[in-house]
Amino acid sequence: MTAAVAKPTIGIIGTGAIGGFYGVMLARAGFDVHFLLRSEFSAVAEHGLHIDSAPHGALTLNPVQAYSSAEDMPPCDWLLVGAKTTSNAGLAPAIIQAAAPNAKVLLLQNGLDVEDSLRALLPDTLHLLGGLCLICVHRTGPGAITHQALGAVNVGYHSGPAGDEQARMAIVEEGAGLFRSAGIDSQAMANLQQARWQKLVWNIPYNGLSVLLGAGTTALMADADSRELIKALMAEVVRGAKACGHDMPAGYADYLFMMTEKMPDYWPSMHHDFLHKRPLELAAIYARPLAVAKAAGCELPRIDALYRSLSFIDRRNT
Ligand SMILES: NC(=O)C1=CN([C@@H]2O[C@H](COP(=O)(O)OP(=O)(O)OC[C@H]3O[C@@H](n4cnc5c(N)ncnc54)[C@H](OP(=O)(O)O)[C@@H]3O)[C@@H](O)[C@H]2O)C=CC1
Ligand SMILES: CC(C)(CO)C(=O)C(=O)O
C-alpha cells in the first residue's frame, strides 16, 4: 500500500485580484491556503473572499485563513506572490517569515526580471519561480474580485537550490500541477525569460495605452489608429525579444491581437493602478525590457516613447 502524499501548504503573499483568485481556486480544490493581506485584512477576515467569475459563477471562500502579519502564518511549502512588482523588494521579510525550509516562491507577476530584486534578499535555500497569468481579474471592493475571462498560468524556474535542469523542471511541473488540480490550465515553461517576453507582447501595448488613451480593450481594438499602434508596439516587443535570444512562436503577435478582439472589454491592471493613484509597474514592464534590448544593440523607439509618456503620467499621479 502506498502512503497518501500530503498536499502542500500554500501561502498567498498579497491577496489582491491575482492572489485572491488563485488562492480561492486552490482552497476550493482542497489545499490548505493561508492569505496575507494588508488594507483588506479586516474585511476579508470578517466577510471572506468573493469572486464574481464569468467562467465559474459566484465563488465564495468564508471563513478565510487570513493574516495581517506573516509572523502569524504557518510554514508554507509554496508561496504565491500576488503583490505588484513595485513592492517586491519590501516583501522579502514576509516571504522569509512564511517560508518552510526549501519552500518554492512563485511570483505571479507581469514584467521582465521581476525575480532579481527579491533573489538577492532571499536565502539560497528557497526556490524562486515566475508565473505568467493569462487572466482578466480585478478588485471591485474589499474582498471582492471580478473575473472576466481566461485563467491559465505558465510557470518557469528562476533560481535556487535545484541542482540541474531535471530537478528544476520537476519543481516547475509540481507548480503547474497545483494549478491543474484546481481546474486551471497551466504549462511548465522550460525558459522563464522566454515566457516573460511572450507575455510582454500583450502587456507593453495594452497596459500602457489603456492609461495613456484612457481606453479599455474594446475601444482600443475598435479604432484604426490605436490598432496600428498596438501592432507596431507588438512588433517592437517581438524584435526586442529576438535581439535578446528569444524567438517568439510564429504568428504569436497576431494570435494575441485576435485573442484580444474576442475578449470582453478589459482594463489592464495598470489602468486600475492609475485610477487608484498607485505606482505603475513601469520598471518591470517597460524600463527593464528597453534596457536589456538596448544592451543587445536593439533600440525600441515606440516603446521608449510610450514609457516616457507613462513615466510623466506616473510622476504626477502618485
Ligand atoms: N489583474 C490581472 O488581470 C492581471 C495581473 N497580472 C499581474 O499580477 C500582479 C498582481 O496584480 P493584481 O492582482 O491585479 O494587483 P492588485 O493590486 O489587485 O493586488 C496586489 C495586492 O498585493 C497587496 N500587497 C502589496 N504589498 C503588500 C504587503 N507588503 N503586504 C501584504 N499585501 C500586500 C495589496 O494590498 P493593498 O490592498 O493593501 O494595496 C493587494 O491586495 C501584477 O504584477 C500584475 O501585472 C498579470 C496578469 C493579469
Ligand atoms: C493578457 C491578459 C489580458 C490575458 O490575456 C493578461 O493576463 C494581463 O492583463 O496581463
Image (cartoon, rainbow, N blue to C red):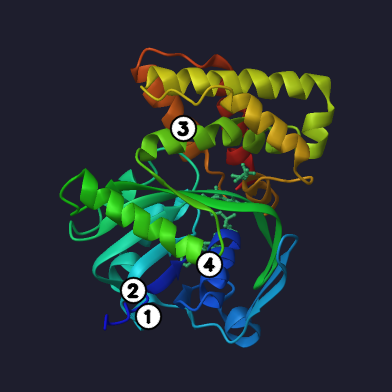
Q: Secondary structure at mark 3?
A: helix
Q: Which residue is mark 4?
A: 182
Q: Amino acid at mark 1?
A: Met
Q: Could you tell whether 199 is left or right of 100 in the image?
A: right
Q: Amino acid at mark 4?
A: Ala
Rendered image: mark on residue 174: none
Labels 3 and 2: the sequence-earlier one: 2
Residue at screen point 39% across, 59% down: 175
Q: Tell me whether circle 2 and circle 1 mark residues in contact (CB < 8 Å).
A: yes
Q: Which residue is mark 2?
A: 76
For marks 4 and 1, give the CA distance: 22 Å
Q: Amino acid at mark 3?
A: Trp
Q: Nearer the viewer, mark 3 or mark 4?
A: 4
Q: Tell me whether circle 3 and circle 1 mark residues in contact (CB < 8 Å).
A: no
Residue 85 lies, in percent from the top left, at: 46, 49
Labels 2 and 4: the sequence-earlier one: 2
For marks 2 and 4, give the CA distance: 18 Å
What is the crowding at mark 4: few (fewer than 14 residues within 10 Å), some, or many (at least 20)?
Answer: some
What is the crowding at mark 1: few (fewer than 14 residues within 10 Å), some, or many (at least 20)?
Answer: some
Labels 4 and 1: the sequence-earlier one: 1
Answer with the quarter of the image where residue 61 lies.
bottom right
Q: Name the quarter where the N terminus is drawn.
A: bottom left
Q: Nearer the viewer, mark 3 or mark 1?
A: 3
Residue 154 lies, in percent from the top left, at: 47, 48
Q: Secondary structure at mark 2?
A: strand
What is the crowding at mark 3: few (fewer than 14 residues within 10 Å), some, or many (at least 20)?
Answer: many
Q: Secondary structure at mark 4?
A: loop
Labels 3 and 4: the sequence-earlier one: 4
Q: Could you tell whether 78 is left or right of 203 in the image?
A: left
Q: Which residue is mark 1?
A: 73
Q: Which residue is mark 3?
A: 197
Between 54 and 89, the one nearer to me in the picture: 54
